[in-house]
Amino acid sequence: MKITWLGQAGLLVEAAGKTILIDPYFSDCVGKIDPSKTRKMPAADWLWDIHADVLLFTHDHIDHYDPETAPHFLKQAGPITVLAPENCWNKARQHGGAHNYVLFDAFTEWTEGAVRFEAVPAVHSDPKAIGVLVHCEGKCLYITGDTLYSRKIIEAIPETVHAVFLPINGVGNNMNMLDAARFARDTHAELAVPIHWGMMDTLNPTDFPFEPKYIPEIYQSFEI
């Protein structure tokens, strides 16, 4: 499957004939509120032309459910399957259209063609925040969403995780690099991909103390 990091926590997953868009943050709505968090990398023009089969939101913070980006995709003719925990679900479905709005709280599963999505808990300042397991092509990707380290989360994760995508910025109730590395080890992930860095900070992801890791380049695709 092909993965593209879209900056912040955004991911584009292309697998089994499906285009999956996760937490797209293409505006600068955070920077408009707090100029110290102005985005450092502009959104590439091609991002707005993505036609998603599945649009997934992990929680209701504006760098994940972006009030300027989400409506752009929800105005598309679709139909799009929208997977979102309760807070985001209530906002997203107000856009109507021909989309299928699926309430996707923790421990919910949804199958779209040959891709199975499994919502798992997250520990974050949004109490409805989730992570998601993406099962496809014989692999399991774990996108943690924004979260702190928690033993309860570890207990909910299957024994085989081929790649974990996790925050390392250490602010806003996210894991720092040390806890993220411990989290990756405890999930027995075969590969860790640090995200949620670089858009609003000056973190150096090579300092993330876990191996093997893959440091993504924004807007550049890679295979898993």
Image (cartoon, helix red, strand yellow):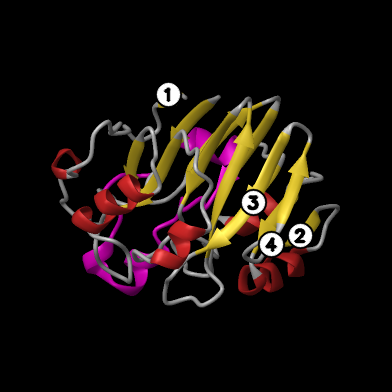
Residue 220 seen anywhere in this rendered image of the structure: yes
Read off the magenta span.
21-50
Disc 3 and disc 4 in contact, CB within 8 angstroms: no
- The residue beneath circle 4 is 104
In the image, is residue 43 part of the stretch drawn in magenta? yes
Tag 3 secondary structure: strand
First in sequence, mark 3 or 1: give its number: 3
Tag 2 secondary structure: strand
Rendered location of residue 178, percent (x, y)? 19, 55
Mark 2 and mark 4: Cα distance apart in space: 6 Å
Q: Quadrant of the N terminus?
A: top right
Q: Looking at numbered disc 1 in the image, what kind of residue is underneath it? A: Phe
Neighbourhood count class around disc 3 (C-alpha, 10 Å): few under 14, some 14–19, many 20 upward: some
Mark 1 and mark 4: Cα distance apart in space: 27 Å
First in sequence, mark 2 or 1: give its number: 2
Q: Residue at x 61, y 57 (%)?
A: 119
Q: Looking at numbered disc 2 in the image, what kind of residue is underneath it? A: Val
Disc 2 and disc 4 in contact, CB within 8 angstroms: yes
**Image quadrant of residue 28?**
bottom left
Left or right? Give the position of 58 relative to 8.
Answer: right
- The residue beneath circle 3 is 118
Image vertical order of residue 141 relative to residue 153, above or below:
above
- The residue beneath circle 2 is 102
Neighbourhood count class around disc 1 (C-alpha, 10 Å): few under 14, some 14–19, many 20 upward: some
Disc 3 and disc 2 in contact, CB within 8 angstroms: no
